[in-house]
Image (tube, helix red, strand yellow):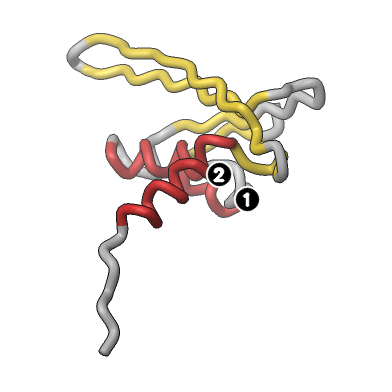
């Protein structure tokens, strides 16, 4: 384990690694109350997100194992595909 602490502290120390955690914290209980763990595995071939939510409703947990981008192993393939889709869906501005 490289880090364990709030999403806010994680974003300050590891800004390139915690975009999913911070996005979830903003949608949930906030960056100060959301606990983030960063685990480095030199043998990992995928980017893994384990998400656990506990509330009055009960508990919810899910795991996402993203493939790394073949041309940039520092990011997930899903992130690249998402960015491409977003760009394709932007409205075109007509020029005069």
Residue 42 on image: x %, y %: 81, 26
Q: Look at the picture and state if 48 lies above or below 78.
A: above
Alpha carbon distance from label 1 to label 2? 5 Å
Say whether residue 42 is left or right of residue 81: right
- Indicate the position of residue 79 as horizontal and vertical percent values: 51, 41
Residue 32: assigned label: none
Pointer 2: residues within 10 angstroms few (<14), some, or many (20+)? many
Q: Quadrant of residue 29?
A: top left
Pick the residue in front: 75 or 6. 75
x 34%, y 20%: residue: 53
Task: Report which residue position mark 2 lands on.
Answer: 10
Instruction: Identify which residue, 12 or 47, lies in the foreground.
Output: 47
Pinpoint residue 20: horizontal percent, then vertical percent.
Answer: 46, 38
Q: Residue 51: name its quadrant.
A: top left
Task: Tell me if mark 1 has few (under 14), some (14-19) or many (20+) residues whose alpha carbon lies within 10 angstroms of its own.
Answer: few
Q: What residue is pinned by disc 1?
A: 13
Quarter of the image with the C terminus in it: bottom left
In the picture shown, does residue 18 fall above or below 89? above
Q: Residue at x 58, y 51 (%)?
A: 15
Q: Where in the figure is residue 54, as x and y percent of width and height? A: 31, 17
* Left or right, residue 33 beside residue 70: left
Secondary structure, mark 2, is helix
Q: Residue furthest bottom?
A: 96
- C-beta proximity under 8 Å, tags 1 and 2: yes
- The residue positioned farthest toward the right in the image shown: 42
Residue in the image at 69% along x and 26% along y: 1
The residue shown at (73%, 22%) is 44
Query: Furthest residue to the left?
Result: 57
Name above or below for residue 7 compared with residue 88.
above
Which of the two residues, 32 or 77, is positioned nearer the viewer here?
A: 77
């Amino acid at each position: 384990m490289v880090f364990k602490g709030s999403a806010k502290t994680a974003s300050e120390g590891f800004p390139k690694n915690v975009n999913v955690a911070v996005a979830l914290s903003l949608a949930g209980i906030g960056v100060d109350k959301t606990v983030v763990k960063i685990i480095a595995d030199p043998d990992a071939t995928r980017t893994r997100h384990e998400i656990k939510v506990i509330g009055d409703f009960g508990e919810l947990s899910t795991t996402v194992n993203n493939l790394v981008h073949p041309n940039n192993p520092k990011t997930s393939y899903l992130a690249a595909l998402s960015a491409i889709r977003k760009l394709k869906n932007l409205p075109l501005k007509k020029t005069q």
